[in-house]
Image (cartoon, rainbow, N blue to C red):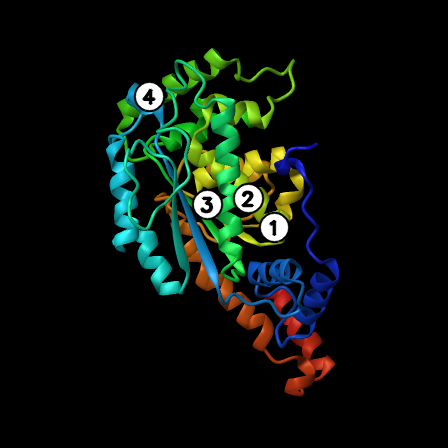
């Protein structure tokens, strides 16, 4: 029997997409003049199987875990910050907490692998191990760890669906997870880590150079360096060797969302690395992803290119937590409102001749 995460997701409704595209063509504006706002409305229409998409009950899922690679000095902050930030999330003081309140989104925090011994109030604990191993020295996860983390992502999605969720936002929290995401992206795209390693939590140039060296040595240790004579490594192998519980859970959540026909907003560098792993593992999940922004983190543009993704925003964000996706949510809601509520040429009494003139003017402006 095939593993659950390899089962194909349905394709979004192409008839609904065609109807939405036809509606865009008759709204009182030159065709294409709202740019990506038109395309995101059409994509949501297909995902929601309706000509008139809308977002009423978004749900944000944040997966948290600790990473053994921190022992190599690749992060500005100690592992304890992961647990402290989870407490901050549920207390309402973090950026994603504010964004969730402002957008009316439900916020769920899932501990899939922190070093905390005791569970936190209002945090879902779904882990079998406290933290991943140091992947500079050994595999980050065991096969059991990986299987559990992927399924934890699936379980989180299924819980969210019981609340009549109509859109998911995925995020992560884990000191050291920028290093894991970089290693995953480098291995899957067969790219030298130096080309895509960024500052993460804000390390200085010397720290960045050290981080690049650690990641290069790690990929050599695991046999994951670029080799034109070999096919790219399998995504499960990459996640197990250099990933983490949070990244694996986000990967599983992307796939489960698609299998349940739920559109999902993709956040920044770390979540996009997980999205790449998900698409390599199960390509059918790609049409259900909406890419929200390009992070300031070095290498994010490279992964977006691999996924042929055109994000909605590029405003220098690099916080993680799902924050960039949450920032883009009002824009996507506006795209839906424009799509649903603008008058058509017929409604507004605008003639075809006037419409053609408007389009010609737009083309020559």
Label 2 CA crowd tier, 10 Å (few <14, some 14–19, many 20+): many
Judge depth for marks 2 and 3 and give the one in front: 2
| Residue found 70% across the figure and 61% down from its top | 17
**In terms of depth relative to the viewer, which is nearer, 76 or 3?**
3
First in sequence: mark 3 vs mark 1: 1
What's the distance in space between the residues labelled 3 and 1, CA to CA?
Answer: 18 Å
First in sequence: mark 4 vs mark 3: 4
Judge depth for marks 3 and 1 and give the one in front: 1
| Residue found 39% across the figure and 16% down from its top | 136
Disc marking residue 288: 1
The image shows residue 10, relative to residue 32, as above or below, that is: above
First in sequence: mark 1 vs mark 2: 2
The answer to whether residue 197 is seen in the rendering is no
Secondary structure type for disc 3: loop
The image shows residue 122, relative to residue 241, as above or below, that is: below
| Tag 1 near tag 2, CB within 8 Å | yes
Label 4 CA crowd tier, 10 Å (few <14, some 14–19, many 20+): some
* Relative horizontal placement of residue 200, taking residue 265 as reference (left or right): left
What's the distance in space between the residues labelled 4 and 3, CA to CA?
Answer: 23 Å
Q: Which residue is mark 3?
A: 294
Judge depth for marks 2 and 4 and give the one in front: 2
| Tag 2 near tag 4, CB within 8 Å | no
């Amino acid at each position: 029997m095939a593993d659950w995460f390899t089962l194909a997701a349905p394709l979004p409704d192409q008839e609904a997409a065609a109807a939405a595209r036809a509606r865009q063509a008759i709204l009182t504006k030159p065709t294409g003049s709202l740019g990506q706002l038109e395309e995101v409305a059409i994509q949501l229409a297909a995902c929601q199987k309706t000509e008139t998409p809308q977002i009423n009950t978004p749900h944000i899922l944040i997966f948290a875990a600790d990473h053994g690679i921190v022992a190599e000095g690749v992060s500005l902050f100690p592992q304890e910050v992961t647990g402290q930030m989870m407490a901050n999330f549920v207390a309402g003081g973090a950026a994603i907490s504010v964004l969730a309140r402002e957008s009316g989104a439900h916020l769920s925090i899932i501990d899939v692998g922190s070093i905390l011994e005791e569970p936190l109030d209002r945090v879902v604990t779904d882990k079998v191990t406290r933290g991943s191993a140091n992947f500079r020295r050994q595999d980050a996860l065991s096969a059991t760890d990986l299987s559990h983390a992927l399924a934890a992502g699936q379980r989180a999605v299924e819980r969210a669906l019981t609340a009549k969720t109509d859109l998911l936002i995925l995020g992560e929290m884990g000191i050291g997870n920028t290093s894991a995401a970089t290693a995953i992206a480098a291995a899957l795209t067969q790219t030298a880590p130096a080309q895509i390693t960024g500052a993460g939590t804000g390390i200085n140039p010397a720290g960045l150079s050290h981080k690049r060296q650690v990641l290069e040595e790690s990929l050599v240790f695991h046999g994951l360096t670029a080799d034109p004579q070999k096919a790219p490594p399998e995504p499960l192998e990459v996640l197990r060797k250099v990933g983490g519980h949070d990244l694996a859970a986000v990967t599983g959540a992307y796939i489960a969302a698609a299998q349940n026909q739920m559109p999902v907003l993709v956040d920044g560098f770390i979540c996009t690395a997980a999205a790449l792993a998900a698409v390599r593992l199960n390509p059918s999940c790609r049409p259900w992803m909406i890419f929200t922004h390009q992070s300031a983190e070095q290498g994010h543009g490279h992964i977006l290119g691999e996924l042929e993704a055109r994000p909605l925003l590029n405003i220098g964000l690099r916080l993680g937590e799902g924050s960039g996706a949450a920032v883009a949510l009002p824009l996507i809601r506006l795209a839906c409102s424009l799509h649903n509520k603008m008058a058509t040429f017929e409604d507004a009494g605008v003639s075809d001749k006037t419409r053609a003139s408007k389009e010609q003017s737009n083309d020559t402006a």
